[in-house]
Image: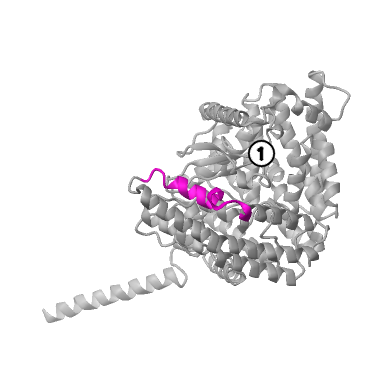
Amino acid sequence: MKKKYKCILGIFALLLLIGGWWSYRLIWGKPLNIDHFYERVFIEIALDDPELFSSLGFIDNTLLDFHSDDLTDSSPRRDKELAQKIRRDLESLRSYSVESQSDSQRLSTEILEWFLDDAVRSEEFLFHNYPVNQLFGIQSNLPSFMESTHQVINEKSAENYLSRLSKFGTKFDQVIEGLKLREDRGIVPPKFVIEKVLVEMNNFVSQPVEENILFSSFKLKMVDIEEFDDQKREKYLEEASIEIEKTVHPAYRKLIAFFEALEAKATTDDGVWKLPDGDAYYAYQLRSNTTSDYTPEEVHQIGLSEVARIQGEMTAILERLGQTGKPVAETMRLLAEEKQFQYPNTDVGRENIVRDYVAIVDEIDAGVSEVFNVRPKMGMEVKRIPEFKQETAPMAYYQSPAMDGSRPGVFYVNLRDLKNLPKFSMRTLVYHEGIPGHHFQLAIAQELEGLPTFRKIIPFTAYVEGWALYTERLAWELGYQKDPHDNLGRLQDELLRAVRLVVDTGIHYKKWTREEAIEYMLANTGTPEGEVVTEIERYIVIPGQACAYKIGMLKILELREKAKSQLGDKFKLSDFHDVVLKNGAMPLSVLEKVVDTYIEDKAAS
């Protein structure tokens, strides 16, 4: 009996030893199973990023919620630590035997390797960006995060909201530390960026507290909480008001003071060629965003070729409509001003345009089933971009659903000036940002089963934006833009993406001035001048990103035509869309391999 007891203890001790060894490998060492490694890479990044965790909506307001009272560390130290971690993760990933992996694992490995390798390549340019600019940055993103992402459903989440407000000062100090480091290295935003950010921040702090988005959205979030009586709501609102005055406003004023001092060092040279190793930085940005090996000159030439082709198609339509004698850009500008294509620039007009956007969403949502085998479970709403950020925000953007199903996808549209939203541009905007564009792709990716978490959320701009631009054309092919004016709207938007290839490389590679880029876009697109200025200034602060749209679309179209020509009668559009959508985002080079495999398998069946 004693011998048997010792044997049981020995087995138990061995199991504890094996379990401890396995746990050590899983958490600190090299996990035995590569699937566990995939999840660890994601979990380690997410655990260190409270704002990302809230955006994903995994465990907010549950017993496991450890993060909703905190903000993400934005210090240079954390940036450097993250870069070192990514380098270690890439080395670990490459140490796994590819031969022993399943087909799905090989694809996951290839996607993750490209992503991590790209991040390692960026290390030498870690501080080359402008983290506070007229489009995004702590001054606008953080209030937007608090308004749109932080949920308030009970006392704890209300207290967490106040806790996050109390940490604005720390986060702003971390950002300023990084800005000073960039300043010391000669990385200073162009003068117009500083001017616009200062206007934005000064407007933010000059508002009465009760009108501040941090106060008003908090007040709105508490309206439907049954356990809150008026006294409790007032208590929390008073605490929020105090925190805004005590912490938030001083944080903004400190950043304002920094930018006022920085303005004296700013110049009107807008391209990143002016930065240390600027040409190498731009080449990296192009590769990272387009996930291709095109040189700046090649991208520029592709842009010129596409501009000529699209303008030719538009000219043919305009001639059939009796619009002759003027350049495409001028004709489109005049069309957009016609009363039949305009909403009144009033509150009623804004209500009507949102209603009509919803109708377009409902129409396309009900009609695309024949070419999509898979559809997202989560719905999508249409909302106005918050007024406090509309002046420098883009025309529209999409926000993914929460992964726990607590928040639908949202198509945000900028209603600051309805003159910039002619009716013939509405359909293509819905198809791109909503259905079957970003909403289908991003929501479907989140809902995929049997894939590592990173494949559901990893961002590859050329794939994501290439798909959205592809769906604008797809909707036309399916008959959703039968009106020639709607088709002109589609082509004008595609023309804009082609012009981006020209002006982005023009600014950052050919040393065009901001004014030269604006002049080229005005002369070639017909886009209103205010929107052109916003667009050009966007390309200046995020070099290379705008090139990803057209490069991605061209690759997806190329792969579709390749599949059609090689499969003949075996080709089915819904199957092709499955291949593109049911693997999550990936670099274009990897997507091509996936489509090639689909073609081979389908041809052999």
Q: Is residue 583 left or right of residue 588?
A: left
Q: Nearer the viewer, residue 87 or 589?
A: 87
- Left or right of residue 357: residue 306: right
Q: Quadrant of residue 417?
A: top right
Q: Nearer the viewer, residue 599 or 412?
A: 412
Residue 485 location (% of width, % of height): 72, 24
Figure colour scheme: one colour
Q: Main secondary structure of the magenta part?
A: helix
- Residue drawn at x 83%, y 47% is 517
- The residue closer to the viewer here, 57 or 114, is 57
* Rendered-image quadrant of the N terminus: bottom left
Q: Report which quarter residue 534 is drawn in.
A: top right
Residue 114 coordinates in the image, percent (x, y): 61, 58
Farthest residue toward the right?
325
Q: Position of residue 107 (x, y in %)?
A: 54, 53
Q: Is residue 261 above or below residue 445?
A: below
The residue at the far left in this view is: 1
Res. 260 in view: yes
Q: Which residue is mark 1?
A: 416
In the rendered image of this protein, does residue 177 appear above or below residue 488?
below
Under mark 1, the amino acid is Arg
**Does residue 317 appear to the left or right of 179 in the view shown?**
right
Q: Which residues are magenta?
A: 205-225
Q: Nearer the viewer, residue 107 or 375?
A: 375
Tell me which residue sits at (86%, 30%) in the image.
327
- The answer to whether any part of residue 286 appears in the image is no
Instruction: Examine the structure image and report whether residue 433 is included in the region drawn in magenta.
Output: no
Residue at (69% x, 70% y) in the render: 180
Mark 1 lies on a secondary structure that is loop
Is residue 217 inside the magenta stretch?
yes
**Percent x, y of residue 315:** 82, 27
Residue 596 located left or right of residue 37: right
